[in-house]
Image: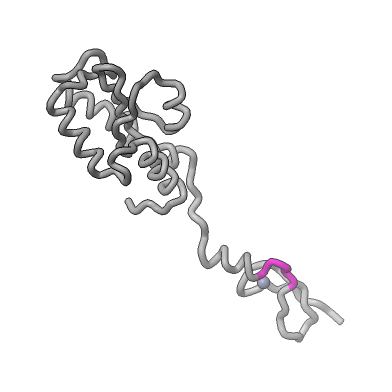
Amino acid sequence: MSHVVARCPLCNQKSSVPDGAAFQCHNDTCAEDAERIRNPREVITREQMMRDCAVVYYVAFGNRIRIGTTTDLAGRMKALPYDEFVAFEFGGYHLARQRRAQFSGARITVTWLERSDQELKTWIRQLRAAMEYPNDATRSATRAVKRRLLGLEVR
Ligand SMILES: [Zn+2]
């Protein structure tokens, strides 16, 4: 008996079937493959992920506030000297630079600002009020980054 090779209309894999017989898919993972075709998982590049999950952080050290940015918050927090992680917002290098310019009146160095600056204090209060746990920036940031990595964050 001759066979013909046809593509499964569901999984798109080739199967050999007897000529004249009804098509039968021989792909063991037909259902899974068909599902992947129906709902292609979004492929996220490392660059996209870094951009989406970059965080602008505000840490206090003595009478200073540092505004910086990182795509590895946990790692950065281990490496930085600070007394308190006070606030965060999603954003990368450009946002961090924009914030430093915004509070240039409080500037001590490029990244360190005067903690007592009123405008900066007001801004940090606003950021904290918007956090999931207004009194725990570390926990709020960790959870926000995780949600975003898992694609649960609405942007
Ligand atoms: Zn199939």
- Residue at the spot 30% in from the left edge and 38% down from the top edge: 135
Residue 38, percent across and down?
A: 52, 67
Which quadrant of the frame does ligand 1 lie within? bottom right
Task: Tell me the quarter of the picture where residue 79 sits.
Answer: top left
Q: Where's the N terminus, which quadrant?
A: bottom right
- Residue at the spot 12% in from the left edge and 26% down from the top edge: 118
Residue farthest toward the front in the current orientation of the protein: 135
Residue 118 in the figure: left or right of residue 25: left
Task: Tell me the quarter of the picture where residue 63 sits.
Answer: top left
Q: Is residue 96 above or below residue 89?
A: above
Residue 33, percent across and down?
A: 62, 65
Q: Please provide the residue range marked out in magenta.
A: 26-30
Give the total of numbered labels: 0
Residue 32, percent across and down?
A: 63, 66
Q: Is residue 118 above or below residue 128?
A: above
- Residue at the spot 32% in from the left edge and 32% down from the top edge: 56
Residue 146 in the figure: left or right of residue 102: right
Residue 144, percent across and down?
A: 38, 44
Q: Is the magenta region chiefly helix, strand or loop? A: loop
Q: Is 36 included in the stretch rendered in magenta? A: no
Residue in the foreground of this view, choosing between 93 and 62: 62
Residue farthest toward the top in the current orientation of the protein: 109
- The image's colour scheme reads one colour
Residue 64 in the figure: left or right of residue 24: left
- Residue at the spot 23% in from the left edge and 19% down from the top edge: 113
Q: Is residue 9 above or below residue 130?
A: below
